[in-house]
Image (cartoon, grey):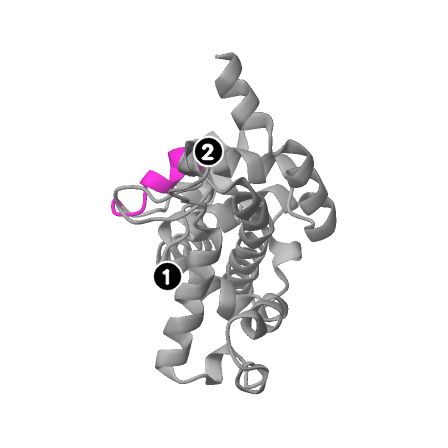
Amino acid sequence: RTAVTEWQNQFDSLILNVSKDSGVPAHLLKNLFAKESQFWPGINAKKDVGLGQLTEHGADTTLLWNPPFFYQFCPLVMDSGECAKGYLHLEEKQQVYVRQALIAAVNATCENCPLRIDVERANFSIGVFAHTLLANCEQAGQLVKNITGGTAGKASTYEDLWKFTLVNYNAGPGCLGDALDAAKTDKQDLNWENVSKHLTPACVGAVDYVNDISR
């Protein structure tokens, strides 16, 4: 138990610093890591990667919906002139390359490291996952705006918008968009209680996911 607690808490100070820099709530970020990977930043059986279990679809969301991060990360792995085009305007093979590079950047598996984990790479990945959450927040906010015609902050509370962000992260924008649309059609306020009830059977697993992380 002592070893487990020490392992889980070793990222706390960095999570707090990343939270201050990014605006992503620290408890949300840590609880996400607990839920997704139990703080083990390698690859799981489904080939999801890192503390937040990044997938290629998740990397695509990060790079597309968080342009500042894309312009920061892309020159690290590709010619800066190509990066200047923006993610959306790269050739498909270039997009694939950047996505895979991002996934590799959060994979802390290391055969020659203690416990086979590169802790420095795991530390780096915390900032990446914060930017990934910001990208999902941006996409979730756009979905709310599309449905209401106004800014997301006027339609939903700060806490509800983070919960919508977690649905987007876990189940995807299709699940979130349909639930938002159904709640709006029923003339309900766009809060978590109402929207969660409209998640379809294929998406309803996101309810426990969100509730576990936001406790």
Residue range of the region highlighted in magenta in the rendering: 201-209
Label 1: element kind? helix
Q: Residue furthest front?
A: 112
Q: Which residue is mark 1?
A: 57
Image height of 12 relative to 6, above or below: below
Label 2: element kind? helix
**Residue at horizontal 37%, vertical 61%?**
57
Q: Amino acid at mark 1?
A: His
x and y, in percent, of residue 171 in the image: 36, 50
Any part of residue 75 in sight? yes
Frontmost residue, 62 versus 17: 17
Q: CA distance from mark 2 to mark 1?
A: 30 Å
Q: Which residue is mark 2?
A: 114
**Residue at horizontal 60%, vertical 73%?**
71
x and y, in percent, of residue 9 in the image: 59, 26
**Residue at horizontal 42%, vertical 58%?**
103
